[in-house]
Image: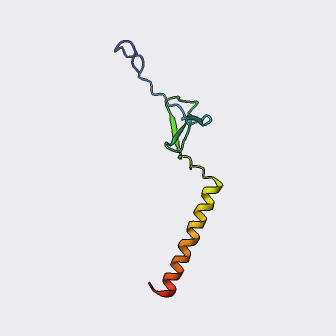
Amino acid sequence: MYCVNCPAEISRAHVETAATGHAWGEWEVVKQASANEEGLMRRVCANDPGHVEEETIPKLQPQTSLFQRFIERIREFFENIIEWFRRLFRF
């Protein structure tokens, strides 16, 4: 072991310490997710603040209105009818 301030040797004794493991804190949202961008959350180890875990938050799905879903279902319905006629009459 050497001095932090100068090159002097302080000790040659071999010292073993038990690993403390991680004691992860709670996840904190660093950046909220939006429909355009992913978000980010992070947690820090209480035993060593240099140990950090990060996880992305998926983009939010855009909300569709009831009317938009109704129009989508009608479109799908007519596409299925057209496909049925194509198969029936082979055109």
Q: Which of 60 and 23 is in front in this view?
A: 60
Where 47 falls versus 91 (above or below)? above
Where 66 falls versus 74 (above or below)? above
Residue for point 58% across, 35% down: 29
Within the image, what quadrant is residue 80 found in?
bottom right
Where is residue 43? Give x, y as percent: 56, 35
Q: Nearer the viewer, residue 51 or 86?
A: 86
Question: Which residue is situated farthest in the top direction here?
Answer: 5
Where 36 falls versus 8 (above or below)? below
Q: Which of 22 and 56 is in front in this view?
A: 56
Viewport quadrant of the N terminus: top left
Question: Which residue is situated farthest in the bottom direction here?
Answer: 89
Residue for point 63% across, 52% down: 65
Where is residue 33? Give x, y as percent: 55, 41
Where 71 falls versus 45 (above or below)? below
Q: In this view, does 27 lie to the left or right of 37?
A: right
State the count of labels: 0
Within the image, what quadrant is residue 44 found in?
top right
Viewport quadrant of the C terminus: bottom left
Colour scheme employed for the rendering of this structure: rainbow
Where is residue 30? Give x, y as percent: 54, 33
Question: Which residue is situated farthest in the right direction here?
Answer: 66
Q: Nearer the viewer, residue 63 or 13?
A: 63
Q: In this view, does 13 lie to the left or right of 47?
A: left
Where is residue 24? Give x, y as percent: 59, 36
